[in-house]
Image (cartoon, rainbow, N blue to C red):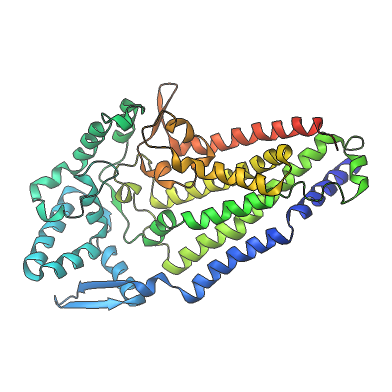
Amino acid sequence: MIISKQKAALVKFELLKLINKITLFCIIFFITIITRRIIFFNSNDFYTINYFDENGTQKHAEGEQAFEIQKSLSNKHKGELNDKKFEQALIYYKELVKQFDLMGELAWQKEYNGIFSVFQQAFAPPEEKNYYITGTLHTNDMQYIYKNRIYQLEESMSSPKNKIHASKKVIEAAEKIKTPFYYDGNYDSWRGLIQGSKKYLLYFFLIIIICSSFIFYNETIFSSCIHFSIPTLNGRKEHALSKITALIICGTLIYLFTVGLYISFILLERGTDGANTQIQIMYFYSLYNGTVKDAVIHYFLIIYFAGLFFALFTFFVSLYVKNIVTTIMLSVGLLLLGGYIPEGNIFERLIFLFPGSVLSIKNIISRPIVYNLFGRPVLLAHMYIPSCIILSIVLAALIVKKYKKMEF
């Protein structure tokens, strides 16, 4: 019991060092940014839509009203996107364009945004979109949409930048995706979480890194008693583990206060409609087998474990450099490293298994990246969390080992 109390006291001591004025300032700054957006900036205020009412009269709406109309129009087309539904949408498109020209086309794109997204991607190579394809399509083309997905993937695997990928496994994974795709109506909130999160997640990682860099802040002047306890009563191993525990607790709290707030804001602002929309409607060539909601949950879990990795990495760096500014610079450099690896580079597949690429959801969810694990295709998205956990455990072991050898 005494030992447990001593461990708890050490963890509390380390936690109080991490939650200092600068860390609190960073968290408050992040919350202020989110709160400011909630109060002064509603993305729905900038929403506009041209549409046709039940009588076929052309109308225009803006702001919250436009967003609600968009949702109601999109929700009319919920269900499986089969060939028949594609044909009906295309016939209606041609009627509107013939009668109303550009205004008819814009109205159709808003109402059929899910089908329009599929049209844009189905007849273009992966990672590209053909924004003008709808006007060139015929009803006979609709039967080739899902077949074209496999064909385009096979073609893309022969390009130089994709030669490093396990092409046969990519096609094998693609063929397992359920078709026809399911559309659950307007999914703007989930799309916003996926596509608009990079800036806010960067803030989260910066706060984690800044907070973790203070792990040795005032280490030598807090109390002379702590140095007596390091080599004797608790041991250096226990003291190192208390620091690691404090980092995990602090990182979890920061995640809840920052990322949790951001997610809550987006879902409260735009609602949770369209959660069961298949991710392939948004990313046509994605091999992720799930809905947009599944993809969002998975990605933000990845963010959490990557955040803990960077907390430990910052601690590890601080053991060697013992300088807060240098520690922060090195950790931020690693965070941004993943974005500078060119596609098709020999290091690409290695960096994808490293938390430095975590800010690029495009690489994690949308790109058809498959690893051949014991003869089975495994997606990058499913390897990322185990990778973060394994690397974090390795870092924790290295921290304890280094801490035992340090001189105080």
Q: Is residue 200 above or below residue 181?
A: below
On the image, the x and y values in percent for residue 66 come to 31, 74
On the image, the x and y values in percent for residue 132 come to 16, 55
Q: Is residue 342 above or below residue 57?
A: above
> Image check: 346 left or right of 39?
left
Q: Which residue extends farthest top?
A: 374
Total labels: the figure holds 0
Image quarter where the N terminus lies is: top right
On the image, the x and y values in percent for residue 27 come to 63, 61
Q: Is residue 182 above or below residue 126?
A: below
Give the image quarter of residue 113. bottom left
Identified at 11% across, 56% down, the residue is 135
Q: Nearer the viewer, residue 161 or 95?
A: 161
> Image check: 24 left or right of 150?
right
Give the image quarter of residue 343. top left
Identified at 75% across, 30% down, the residue is 401
Identified at 23% across, 55% down, the residue is 115
Image quarter where the C terminus lies is: top right
Q: Nearer the viewer, residue 11 or 321?
A: 321
Q: Nearer the viewer, residue 318 or 212?
A: 318
On the image, the x and y values in percent for residue 76 come to 25, 64
